[in-house]
Amino acid sequence: MITSIAIALFASFVVARFNGGVGKLPVMGYDTYNAFGSDYNGSLALEQIAAMKSLGLIDLGYNTFILDDFQYEVNRSATGELLGNKAKFPEGIVEWTKKAKSYGVTISPYSSNGLKTCGGYPGGYGHELQDLETWRSWGWSYMVKYDNCNFPSDNITQQNEYGRYERMEVAIDQLAAKYNEPPFIYSLCQWGWENPQNWAPRIAQAWRIDNDIKPYWNSIATVLKQASESYLATGFYQHGDMDMLEVGNNGQGTPVGDLTYDEQKTHFTAWAFLKSHLLIGTDLRNAANQTIEILTNKEIIAINQDLNEGQAIAPFRTDVYYQADDASYTFQNPPGYWAGNSTQGPIFMIINTADTTQTLGFNLTENWAVRAGRQYKVRDLWLHQNIGTAVRTWNVTLPSHGVAALLLTDDGPEPANETPPYSFLHQCRNLNTSILLKELPTSTSVRV
């Protein structure tokens, strides 16, 4: 009886929270922060949106535009409303929004659960429903990115992080009910504090898993390491947000980055396969061909936006510790071996975390979605071609910090008389006695 009641309560909670049907898949779009920080205005934002259109990014699904921090006036109106920054949007925020939406994007707001945003502009604490009403009146309608800065002291809030974020969740539901409209997607930006994978799915469709990303390999690797510890919470309507993309920010961005081409491919693959938001964060006006090649990889995007498989890939091995030059800081490489499933078939992501070219091998059945005793066609999702047929194992040779994104397709039974008769040696048994091989006398003859 207790079990059935618990299941019913959980089911009713899920239906109530997500009856708007929004946020099933990770969000794709653009965020101003990584490229420009505070140094942007309406004209620059429109240029980015125009580039998104001309480059085909909007048609690929990058269809929301987030004006990150610094877009408001420093003070609210006399009645408490947010005001669009007149210097940044001289035509007015409503007129600017009309121009932006004419390209086919939605506009998504940014705020914080405190009295001020991280940049010192009006925060949402105590104004949650009022701010939602304001954004709606401006024509903003898709996702609320909600930061974690400048919140009141504990004796005022008498809430922990969950409670401070729950205030906006309640307001989002109230707004949707008032106008009989789909609710805003709710994306928390709390930098992985207080293990959000344990509580954020109750109130939001996404939550940040770690600190702000930077356009350096160690930052990418650190986020991946954190993802390896929290990936299990990811699924439909609940996404671990690994932060905005740094693809394209080699030699530019805020701060200026130094990611190699291979590191950027690894970055994009990992974010896509782990079902994170894909939010472009580079200046598209002068984007390199390699940047556009990465951002428009339809086969990688298809994994991220799979309508039938919401689970993130999972690590199946871990790498060794690496001691940085600074003896006070020990950095652990993220796992290099990841696997999962997709509508099209089992997938693998193999990352060379070393500083030199490496050949890395694995057993196919280390992926739970692979059927033992079958052979598989292997497709490279960066080369966009089939590269062979795998029986039992597969090897890849990768440059430093490079990635292999592999899609497997069942190609029938493996060849006859493959040995050993089991995928793993420790699974081999005497076919007559079912005794583990390691338990048999050394004189016993068993085919392995």
Image (tube, rainbow, N blue to C red):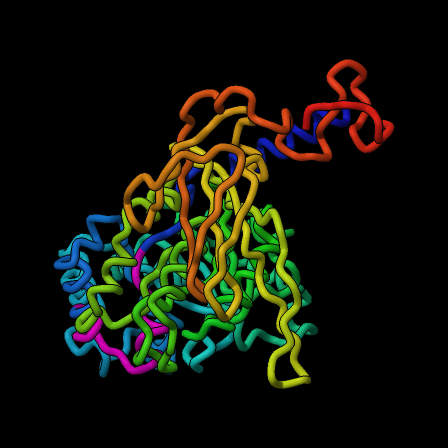
Question: Does any portion of residue 108 appear in the rendered image?
Answer: yes
Q: Residue at x 63, y 71 (%)?
A: 322
In the displayed structure, 88 sits above or below 200; it is: below
165 vs 384, left or right, is: right
Q: Is residue 43 magenta?
A: yes
Looking at the figure, which quarter contains the N terminus?
top right
Of 9 and 259, the residue lying toward us? 259
Q: Residue furthest front?
A: 443
User: Where in the figure is residue 352, as x and y percent of width and height?
Assistant: 49, 60
> How many callouts does the rendering have?
0
User: Where in the figure is residue 273, as x and y percent of width and height?
Assistant: 44, 49
Q: Residue at x 49, y 50 (%)?
A: 239
Looking at the figure, which quarter contains the C terminus?
top right
Start and end of the magenta stretch? 29-46
User: Where in the figure is residue 80, as x and y percent of width and height?
Assistant: 40, 72
424 vs 345, left or right, is: right
Of 397 and 309, the residue lying toward us? 397
In the displayed structure, 433 sits above or below 238; it is: above
Question: Does any portion of residue 63 appear in the rendered image?
Answer: no
Q: Residue furthest top?
A: 432
252 vs 274, left or right, is: left
Of 283 and 420, the residue lying toward us? 420
User: Where in the figure is residue 248, as x and y percent of width and height?
Assistant: 30, 69
Q: Residue at x 47, y 39 (%)?
A: 310
Give the quarter of the image for residue 347: top left
Of 391 and 52, the residue lying toward us? 391
Q: Is residue 259 magenta?
A: no
In the displayed structure, 370 sits above or below 302; it is: above
In the displayed structure, 28 sits above or below 160; it is: above
Give the quarter of the image for residue 154: bottom right
166 vs 132, left or right, is: right
